[in-house]
């Protein structure tokens, strides 16, 4: 049995049993994903999905203006963001996707920029559904297609990031809908709301949850996306499904990326078998998501930036786990006595 073969290979390395901690469980998981006792990581990639949210134009849930989304996309393409620094340092491919930014970006032609715009941001979900169910399905299909293309290019390990002013509110509403947790437990400060702004944000999202009766559609994930999702979140859902279908190792980033995963897991629970969780965000509700999924993250650095930054920091740990499995000597190879000897 493959699991036993992998575990025996891990245990036979020149170290006390379990001495490499979570790296051992990562090596085992990657081996099981790839159906191999000699797994490998190839062309690791971070794909950042950017889109705008109609609610952000009201200023009720976000201290930063909606225009920051497009400005940050320019920053990604100019190499000035944290995700650029980390992907360059760790030799990761970075792709930026316009899933629905409220700006005309058609003139941008950088090779790592993907035009997949579904609209100029979603509708204001205080007044209507954020998007049609047809738009949700289009996003999901597009996300699958983008990851399939990257897989065809040789990538077998992928992490997803996001950029979208107001998207912590969508993530909070998704968490509320799927888990039933109160809005106050699901909402955090996002990009830095002060106390008064946080109260306004909670009150606003409570109105949204009641307006769309989110408590009634827990088991209808595509409806949840239609009511309160963002284009970037819906596209990430498809990306998770596509990565699983392509047998990739999936590195899960922070609060918004995990909200998309909650939806993906409702659609296909086996996606979780492919997921390694990069970190626990400083956004308070991320811990609730991880608890709901019954998973442990690799890192706890107080990050709350998004962009896939946590995933980019975690991929070198995954590469290290695979490297020890393939390159570290066994007791037999090294002529080192085991504890039983």
Image (tube, rainbow, N blue to C red):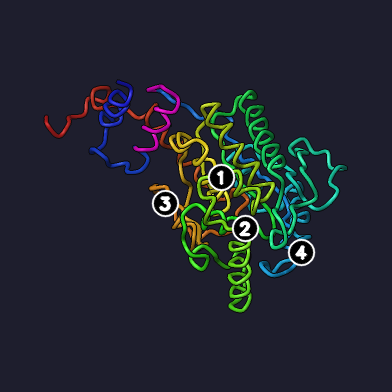
Earlier residue among tags 1 and 3: 1
Residue under label 4, please give it.
Answer: 57
* Residue 152 magenta: no
Label 2: state its secondary structure. helix
Q: Residues within 10 Å of mark 3 (few under 14, many from 20)?
A: few
| Residue at image point 46% right, 54% down | 179
Q: Is residue 84 left or right of residue 113?
A: left
* Distance between mark 1 and mark 3 Cα atoms: 16 Å
Query: Horizontal and vertical percent for residue 143?
Result: 65, 36
Find disc 1 in the rendering and name its residue: 221
Residue drawn at point x = 51 percent, y = 68 percent: 184
User: In this orientation, which residue lies closer to the viewer: 144 or 183?
Assistant: 183
Q: CA distance from mark 1 to mark 2?
A: 13 Å
Distance between mark 4 and mark 1 Cα atoms:
25 Å
Q: CA distance from mark 4 to mark 3?
A: 31 Å
Residue 292 disc label: 3
Chain part drawn in magenta: 25-37
Q: Residue at x 30, y 31 (%)?
A: 10
First along the sequence among labels 2 and 3 = 2
Q: Nearer the viewer, mark 1 or mark 2?
A: 2
Q: Quadrant of residue 205?
A: bottom right
Residue 276, horizontal then vertical, whole percent: 46, 41
- Return the disc, 4 or 3, that comes first in the chain's sequence: 4
* The image quarter in which residue 54 lies: bottom right
Observer-nearest of 145 and 228: 228
Q: Is residue 250 above or below residue 40?
A: below
Q: Earlier in the sequence, mark 4 or mark 1?
A: 4
- The mark that comes first in sequence, 4 or 2, is 4
Upstream in the sequence, badge 1 or badge 2?
Answer: 2
Q: Give the foreground label among 4 and 2.
A: 2
Tag 2 residue: 212
């Amino acid at each position: 049995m493959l699991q036993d073969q992998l575990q025996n290979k891990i245990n036979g390395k020149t170290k006390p049993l379990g001495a490499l901690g979570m790296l051992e469980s990562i090596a085992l998981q990657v081996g099981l994903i790839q159906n191999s006792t000699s797994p490998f990581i190839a062309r690791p990639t971070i794909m950042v999905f950017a889109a705008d949210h109609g609610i952000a134009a009201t200023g009720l849930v976000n201290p930063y203006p909606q225009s920051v989304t497009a400005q940050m996309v320019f920053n990604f393409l100019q190499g000035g963001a944290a995700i650029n620094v980390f992907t360059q340092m760790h030799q990761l491919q970075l792709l930026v996707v316009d899933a629905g930014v409220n700006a005309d970006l058609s003139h941008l032609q950088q090779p790592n920029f993907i035009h997949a715009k579904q609209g100029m941001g979603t509708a204001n979900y205080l007044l209507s559904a954020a998007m049609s169910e047809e738009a949700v399905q289009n996003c999901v299909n597009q996300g699958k297609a983008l990851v399939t293309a990257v897989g065809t290019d040789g990538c077998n390990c992928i992490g997803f990031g996001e950029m979208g002013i107001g998207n912590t509110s969508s993530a909070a509403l998704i968490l509320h809908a799927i888990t039933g947790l109160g809005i106050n437990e699901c909402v955090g400060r996002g990009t830095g709301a002060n106390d008064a702004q946080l109260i306004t944000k909670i009150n606003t999202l409570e109105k949204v949850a009641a307006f769309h009766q989110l408590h009634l559609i827990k088991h209808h994930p595509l409806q949840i996306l239609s009511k309160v999702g963002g284009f970037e979140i819906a596209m990430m859902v498809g990306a998770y499904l596509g990565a699983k279908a392509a047998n990739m190792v999936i590195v899960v980033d922070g609060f918004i990326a995990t909200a998309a995963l909650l939806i993906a897991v409702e659609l296909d629970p086996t996606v979780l078998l492919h997921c390694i969780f990069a970190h626990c965000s400083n956004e308070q509700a991320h811990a609730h998501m991880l608890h709901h999924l019954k998973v442990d993250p690799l890192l706890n650095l107080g990050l709350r930036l998004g962009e896939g930054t946590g995933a980019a920091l975690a991929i070198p740990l995954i590469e290290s786990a695979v490297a020890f499995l393939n390159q570290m000597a066994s007791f037999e190879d090294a002529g080192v006595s085991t504890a039983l000897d």
